Image (cartoon, helix red, strand yellow):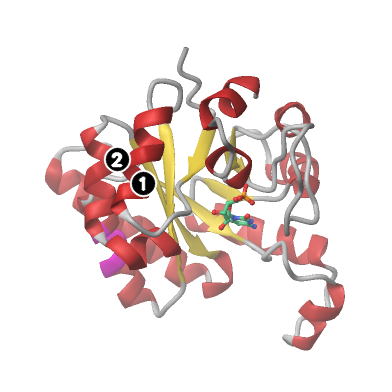
Amino acid sequence: MINDKVIVALDVNTLKEEDRLLDILSEHVQVFKIGIELFYSCGVKSIELVKKYDKDIFLDLKFHDIPNTVYAASKLAAKLGVFMFNVHASGGIDMMKKAVEGAEEESEKLGVARPNILGVTVLTSLDSEALKKTGINKSPEEQVLNLARLAKEAGLDGLVASPEEIVSIRKNIGKDFLIVTPGVRPEESEAGDQKRVSTPKEAFERGADYIVIGRPVTKAKDPLKVRQSI
Ligand code: C5P
């Protein structure tokens, strides 16, 4: 059975490795995430390969640039036919609005559905101290909500959020906003470098719409078995 709420991160750097994972997993996974490692290694070919399997793509390139450049990049993301892509909410409201505008214009032109656009708030690798050093004197939680409100106002469709942020975002921003949650670990797997982790069940109970899972599946001896255990 295909569960389209569990997104698998294809964090590899060759088309051969990507193809291997798609071949093993595509019967059970509908959405695959392409991040900077695979995209900078293999470019648009990595997207075309996922499409060959008739699967959907979350393009995780976290755009962060001036509004005009993000507008152009968002048009391209729409042209590539991805299901989702993301931008840094700290790029500001004008930049986020331009991302929506670019994707909308291109999708209309092509007569296809606009990709979902997600905001990245505070990277989960930053704690209070690290955030302060960037000049932001707010707690990570306050800054996440601050940027979440801005993303909503700009017309984004949702956020990438750690398991710990889901409840507060739902409470403050409402139901009508997608939450996509990485940092998820099945009970039996190692956390790796992810610090704030939860199980898939906890993440969905807290209100995540989608979870992203990478290494526990992709580095497993039997990726399909781990995927099926979720
Ligand atoms: O291997 P793992 O399950 O930790 O992979 C998680 C994926 O989600 C990676 O591709 C990583 O880049 C991404 N991600 C994350 N934490 C965020 C945002 C994205 O781990 N805050």
Residue 52 seen by the camera? yes
Q: Which mark is residue 18?
A: 1
Find the magenta span and give its range. Answer: 72-76
Q: Nearer the viewer, residue 42 or 97?
A: 42
Indicate left or right for 126 with 71 as reference: right
What secondary structure prevails in the magenta region? helix
Q: Is residue 227 above or below residue 90?
A: above
Q: Which mark is residue 163?
A: none
Q: Nearer the viewer, residue 171 or 215?
A: 215
Q: Is mark 1 within 8 Å of ligand 1?
A: no
Q: Is residue 91 above or below residue 6?
A: below
| Residue labelled with disc 2 | 50
Label 2: which secondary element: helix
Rendered-image quarter of ligand 1: bottom right
Residue 119 in the image: x percent, y percent? 54, 57
**Amino acid marked by disc 1:** Glu
Q: Residues within 10 Å of mark 2 (few under 14, many from 20)?
A: many
Residue 9 in the image: x percent, y percent? 50, 46
Residue 222 in the image: x percent, y percent? 55, 30
Q: Is residue 68 above or below residue 20?
A: below
Residue 174 in the image: x percent, y percent? 68, 38
**Amino acid marked by disc 2:** Val
The answer to which of marks 1 and 2 sits earlier in the sequence is 1
Name the front one of labels 1 and 2: 1
Label 1: which secondary element: helix
Q: Is mark 2 within 8 Å of ligand 1?
A: no
Give yes or no for residue 154 being in the magenta stretch.
Answer: no
Residue 178 seen by the camera? no
What residue do we see at 21% from left, 35% from top? Answer: 52
Give yes or no for residue 73 being in the magenta stretch.
Answer: yes
What residue do we see at 63% from left, 41% from top? Answer: 216
Give the image quarter of residue 69.
Answer: bottom left
